[in-house]
């Protein structure tokens, strides 16, 4: 099920990320049989103690997307200059039960990653991000994961690829 939210991209050349700077959201809820595969990230921590899978509702995803820019801006400010340049992101969502608590795990990555393969495209990119989890080793702060609690409407455990 694809969430059809595509907003204009805003790339900041300097200064801190602001709530308005994460203005491009193109997201998809991964099917349950693919959701747990998002936890196989090689350059960042992911949720532990996953006891099950559930399917988030569109309204929960819209709430997540509405709140994510401010949460990301705050985290970027905490982390420093390397994290202060916003880009557009594609987002994959997975509904996970973590210790019997529902969370939506967000896998974020730049928009040029995960396009269906075209002639001349390297084999490493032969997948469609709408259907397959995006797993990138390193990649830096343009790749991150975060947990969203739809009941509390809060984010926790921001994890960026690569060293801090």
Image (tube, rainbow, N blue to C red):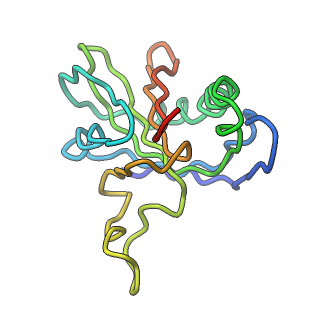
The residue nearer to you, when weighing 92 against 80, is 80
Q: Residue furthest bottom?
A: 119
Percent of width and height locating residue 11: 73, 52
Q: Residue furthest front?
A: 163
Give the residue at x 48% y 32%.
59
Percent of width and height locating residue 61: 48, 35
Q: Quadrant of residue 49?
A: top left
Give the residue at x 28% y 37%.
39
Left/right placement of residue 29 relative to residue 113 reads: left
Q: Quadrant of residue 79?
A: top right
Q: In the image, is residue 7 above or below residue 84?
A: below
Q: Quadrant of residue 124?
A: bottom left
Left/right placement of residue 160 relative to residue 130 reads: right
Give the residue at x 43% y 47%.
138
Give the residue at x 26% y 23%.
48
Q: In the image, is residue 97 above or below residue 95?
A: above
Left/right placement of residue 46 relative to residue 75 reads: left
Percent of width and height locating residue 3: 47, 48
The residue nearer to you, when weighing 21 against 153, is 21
Number of numbered tags placed on the structure image: 0
């Amino acid at each position: 099920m694809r969430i059809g939210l595509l907003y204009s991209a805003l790339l900041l050349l300097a200064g801190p990320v602001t709530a308005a700077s994460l203005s491009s959201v193109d997201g998809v809820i991964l099917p349950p049989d693919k959701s747990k595969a998002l936890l196989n990230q090689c350059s960042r921590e992911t949720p532990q103690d996953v006891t099950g899978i559930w399917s988030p509702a569109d309204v929960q995803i819209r709430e997540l997307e509405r709140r994510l820019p401010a949460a990301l801006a705050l985290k970027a400010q905490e982390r420093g200059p390397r994290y202060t340049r916003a880009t557009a992101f594609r987002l994959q969502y997975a509904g996970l039960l973590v210790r019997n608590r529902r969370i939506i795990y967000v896998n974020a990555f730049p928009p040029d990653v995960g396009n269906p393969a075209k002639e001349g495209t390297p084999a490493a990119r032969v997948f469609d991000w709408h259907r397959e989890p995006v797993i990138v080793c390193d990649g830096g702060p343009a790749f991150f994961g975060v947990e969203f609690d739809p009941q509390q409407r809060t984010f926790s455990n921001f994890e960026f690829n690569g060293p801090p």
